[in-house]
Image (cartoon, coloured by chain):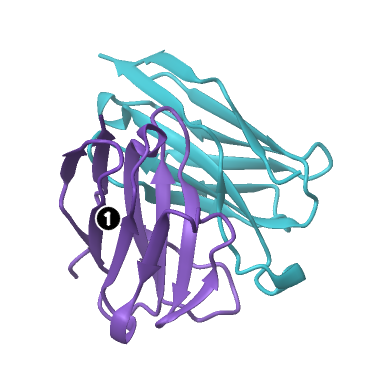
């Protein structure tokens, strides 16, 4: 119930196309859903995050769509660029102090995105 | 603003040897995390410190792993003795540590450990 399932494992998109990565969760107590971007040899960096009181959040070319009833959320990268080639991780966490939680992040297994020029 | 610093960047050891990793968080960040990232997987939390106290070490294999955060700033993670399955990237992260909401975690570049 603490898992976050991410798909696909890898994704190849043409420059200018739309990249879509999906995540699903089981624990309805999760209330924070960030996406992290990781380049080779670097640590993950926060890209965008959403809370379940909204269904969509957009920052530049990156959009999170959130479906609370389906317990799913997805990352959409519009106008994908070669510089977006990286591994993307979705994550989820419980509210701080919920059941003793410290708000720790539970990560998906990652999606390796390659954007072809 | 300087980011999270980690050293060494790479380490190769033989099984049953010991190894230590060092982390210096972003200045002023009260919360520090150590994660293990096995190849092809997402980071998994090992231990979380709030200042110099442990708030979550439920996933730390305490028979071989230990961590400390002296004076609430730098931290070291030690493995003794190492096993083959400990081969992974060890990531350190820090956050402001307001304590009431989830906060952005800033990650260091990690230490890549190979156990032979």
Where is the C terminus of chain B found, in terms of image quarters?
top left
Q: Is residue B44 left or right of residue B87?
A: right
Q: Kindly tell me whether residue B64 is visible in this rendering.
A: yes
At horizontal 25% and vertical 40% (from top left) the residue drawn is B112
At horizontal 33% and vertical 53% (from top left) the residue drawn is B80
The quadrant where residue B25 appears = bottom left
Q: Find chain B in the image and tell me its colour.
A: purple
Q: Residues within 10 Å of mark 1 (few under 14, many from 20)?
A: many
The location of residue B81, given as percent across then percent down, is: 34, 48
Toward the viewer: B11 or A19? B11
The quadrant where residue B11 appears = top left
Q: Find chain A in the image and tell me its colour.
A: cyan
The quadrant where residue B70 appears = bottom left
The location of residue B26, given as percent across then percent down, is: 27, 71
Q: How many marks?
A: 1
Residue extending farthest to the front is B16
In the rendered image of this protein, does residue B13 appear above or below residue B106?
above
In the rendered image of this protein, does residue A52 appear above or below residue B4?
above
The location of residue A80, given as percent across then percent down, is: 37, 26
Toward the viewer: B90 or B1? B90
| Residue at numbered disc 1 | B108
At horizontal 70% and vertical 47% (from top left) the residue drawn is A55
């Amino acid at each position: 119930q603490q898992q976050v399932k991410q798909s696909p494992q890898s994704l190849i998109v043409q420059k200018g196309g739309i990249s879509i990565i999906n995540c699903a969760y089981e624990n309805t107590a999760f209330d924070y859903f960030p996406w992290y971007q990781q380049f080779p040899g670097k640590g993950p960096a926060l890209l965008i995050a959403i809370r379940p009181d909204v269904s969509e959040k957009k920052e530049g070319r990156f959009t999170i769509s959130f479906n609370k009833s389906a317990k799913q959320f997805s990352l959409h990268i519009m106008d994908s660029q070669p510089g977006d080639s990286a591994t993307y991780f979705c994550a989820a966490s419980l509210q701080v102090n919920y059941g003793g939680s410290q708000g720790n992040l539970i990560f998906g297994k990652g999606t390796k995105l390659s954007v072809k020029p | 603003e300087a980011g999270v610093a980690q050293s060494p960047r790479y380490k190769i050891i033989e099984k049953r040897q010991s190894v230590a990793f060092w982390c210096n968080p972003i200045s002023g960040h009260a919360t520090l995390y150590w994660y293990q990232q096995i190849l092809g997987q997402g980071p998994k939390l090992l231990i979380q410190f709030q200042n110099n106290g442990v708030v979550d070490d439920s996933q730390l294999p305490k028979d071989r792993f230990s961590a400390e955060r002296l004076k609430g700033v730098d931290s070291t993670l030690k493995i003794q003795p190492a096993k083959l399955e400990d081969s992974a990237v060890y990531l350190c992260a820090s956050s402001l540590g307001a304590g009431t909401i989830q906060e952005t975690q800033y990650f260091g570049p990690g230490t890549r450990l190979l156990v032979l």
